[in-house]
Every structure is written in structure tokens, then in C-alpha cells.
Image: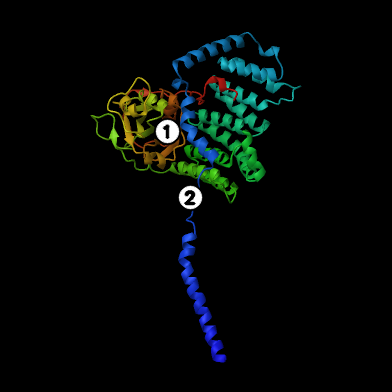
Amino acid sequence: MLSAARSRLVKLPLVSVCSTLLCIPSVLAQTPAPTQPELSPKAAYTDAMQPLESTRAQVANWSDAEIAALKVTIGRAAEQCQARHPEDFDGDPLIDLAKLCALGQAWPAVVQSTTRYINAKDNSKPRLGEAYAAQIDAELHLKDHASALAGAQAMLSAVRYDALTAETIDEVLAYMQFAYTADAVSLAELREPLLLANIKSAATSSAQSAVNDGASQAIHELYDDGLALAALQQLAGEMEDARATVSQLDAALPAALNSDDLLPITASRRRYALLGHPLPQLRLTGYLRHADPLPEIPATNAITALLLFPDWCAQCVRMGKSFPETVFTVAGHEAYLYGMLDETVQPNRTLSSDGFNPADSSLLLQQTPTLVIPGADLDRFAVNGFPFLVITDAHGIVRVAQPIDPNAIQPGNTIDTAIACIGDHWPLRRSSVQKTASRTPHAPATSRTHPPTNSLH
């Protein structure tokens, strides 16, 4: 009996072990492979719509009939604005008047209407955020950066920090970042505590659902706005402050992020990581100045500005046709500028039609300083809008990586101002001979790209 019992004690574990071993393959086969995070259907739809939305936002892409109608609309609005005076109105009608005058591009009247609304003593001011947004937008159109800065500072303390406030502050920062960098840093610093607080509160499920109301920002939007301060601090040479800003942002994030926040935040971090480091090596596959050899990127001992865009970006291709000479100087700083075209479709050998066709883009950009790059190079820059500007200093270090308005290419506009700013902060420590006629930076244009009908959102 004892022997039989021992035999059973020995055999039972063997059977159990064999059964376990036989089951391992089936268990492994049933274990799903780790899935990569992906956007929700709603976020994927928004992402898919970006090419269409960015194209629609540029009035230059509208049809002749639409542009003609817009001109008539602006004229009618200007006439109706001129027929009314802000002193004759109080309360909400002042905001409606400001909206009318903004449509008519009568910027002084917009400032007068919104100022009267903001300064009213006997009004609960339910549209105060709209008033500040319209006032600041008008002041930027009037190139009154000091008033716009004061208005932005007042807005941050007077109204809730929501999507409208974020858009307004972003507009001011975009206007000032290169021409008035110290002011841009101070404004971004004033905003940062609000961003950190909103990130922490947005981590709750109730706050997350509030994002759907259109007024609140998602965590990834708040985080990206927060990184704007770090980028400005780097631009101003405040490297320790920039590192502290990033640390505070990362500490404010919740331990777990949904994919709709995680993926954009990852992309934001990749873009920010470009700053302060050498330009990634680019795989140039062609140069649309056929007679010239492939240039050295970045240029040696000179600032290099690169404008990245795909062939479907109509406003980018139009901008490329007005690229300046490859080498020029801004405020005494030698600079090179190149377009970087990603051909997403097989390029045509002859123009296909009078209308825009992405396959014609390389033909339309013939004899411009435009290089052809693979789409993978766009991915390496985590591009989030077109045209996407990358600028390196004279030592080949990336100082700017961000989307810009196509009008930024015009002489004296954003790109020239950025080159002057970078040249002043990171000069080449040697005497330089000016090789070409110079371009003079001046007060930047406003950064809004949508038609004036949206001035008050």
C-alpha cells in the first residue's frame, strides 16, 4: 500500500508537468501581441482633416468667386462700421460692433469698442474673453505690440484660461517671439502656472469630459503650450530655465495618459528635442535648381533656414515660387534658405492643367532653391503644420522648429526677424563679409491665417 501510494505521489506530478508543458504553446498562441497606441476615431478624424482645414484657412487658396465675394463683404462691413460709433452702444452690442468692424478691417474702431466694453463699470461683462481677444488682435494688426502685451497680461488675470484665451496668447507670442523675445518670455512665464494647474485638473474624468464643450483644452494642448515657454527660454539663451520648465510640465502630467494625449505629447517632445542640437542628417534626393550641385545642409559658418512642406500644400508651393536668392544677409548675418519638398505622389514631367495638382509641384518650383526629401525626413521633425520652419545658427545647431504662415517669407517678415534674432543671440565669432544685398527685418505681421470673418472666433 505504501509503495503504491508513493508510486501515485510520483506519477501525479509527472502527469501535471506534462500537461502544463503541452499547454504552453496554446497559451502563448492565445496571448495577444502588445498593441501600439492609436488615436481614437474622433481624434483620427480631426487629424485626417488637417490638410483640408489648413488649405481652406488660406484665402489665397479660395476660388476667384469667393475672393471677389470676400472683397465685397469687407467693403460692406467697413461701410456699416463707419456709420456707427462705439460711444452710442453699451454691453454686448459693443462686441457685435467690434466683430463688424473687424470684418471691415477697421482696427481702430475695434479697439475703441472693446476698450469701452472692458472698462465699463455697470456691466457684468459675460463676453469679456471675446472683448480681450478682439482688442488684442486689432492691436497686433496696428503693430502696437506694447498695447497687445498689456492686454494679454490683463486677459490672463481677468478671464478663465480656455481655448479662446490660449489662441489669443499664442497669437501674441507668435508675433513677439523673434522681434521682442524678452517680452514673449515674460508673457509665457505669466501663463505657465495656469497651464500647470489646468493640466492637473484635466487629469480628472470630469474635466476630461469638459474638453468636449469646445472651450477647454485637452492635456496635450496644454502641454504643448507649456513647451512654448521652454522653447522661448532656449531662444533667449536661458537653458537652465528651459530645463526647469520641462521638468515642471512632466511632473504635472498624470501617471496614465490616453492615446489621444500620449501620441501628441510624444510628438511635441520630439519637436522640442530638436532645439539646441545639431540638425539631423537629411537624405536629399534632388535639387530643383538642376544646374547646381546638392548644397551642404546646414551651410558652413552661416544661418540656415529650411521650409519643409509636402507637394499637396498649395500655399507652400505658392510661397516657394517667391523664395529669395539662396544666400542673403539679414542685419549683417549671412543666411541660406532652402525649400524642402516631400513628393507624396509621382511627379509629372509636364504641367497637367491650369489648376493646382500636387504632381505638378516640382515643376512649379523649378529653378528655386528647393530640395527634394523623402517623407521620412518630415516624420523625423514631428512636423505639425505646413510650411514648417527649421533654422540653425551659424554653428549648425537647431534654434527654431515650428509651423509658420506662408507670408513669413516676405522680406522683413517673420523669417528675416528670426534670422536676425538667432544671429544676435548666437553670433559667428569671426569677421564676416556681406556677400549680397541685405534684407531688413521689421515689425512682424500678425500670425492669423484665417479670413477676417473669424476675428472674434
Q: How many marks?
A: 2
Residue 390's quadrant in the figure?
Answer: top left
Q: The N terminus is located in which quarter?
A: bottom right
Q: Which mark is residue 354?
A: none
321, 54: nearer the viewer: 54
Label 1 CA crowd tier, 10 Å (few <14, some 14–19, many 20+): many
Q: Tell me if residue 193 comes above or below residue 183 in the rendering.
A: below
Q: Is 151 rendered above or below residue 425?
A: above
Between marks 1 and 2 in the image, the one whose residue lies nearer the viewer = 2
- The residue pinned by badge 1 equals 389
Q: Which amino acid type is marked by label 2?
A: Gln
Q: Is residue 332 left or right of residue 456?
A: left
Disc 2 target residue: 36
Image position, residue 78 (x, y; %): 57, 11
Give the camera-side residue of 46 and 313.
46
Which image quarter is the C terminus in?
A: top right
Under tag 1, what secondary structure?
strand
Is residue 281 shown to the viewer in this render?
yes
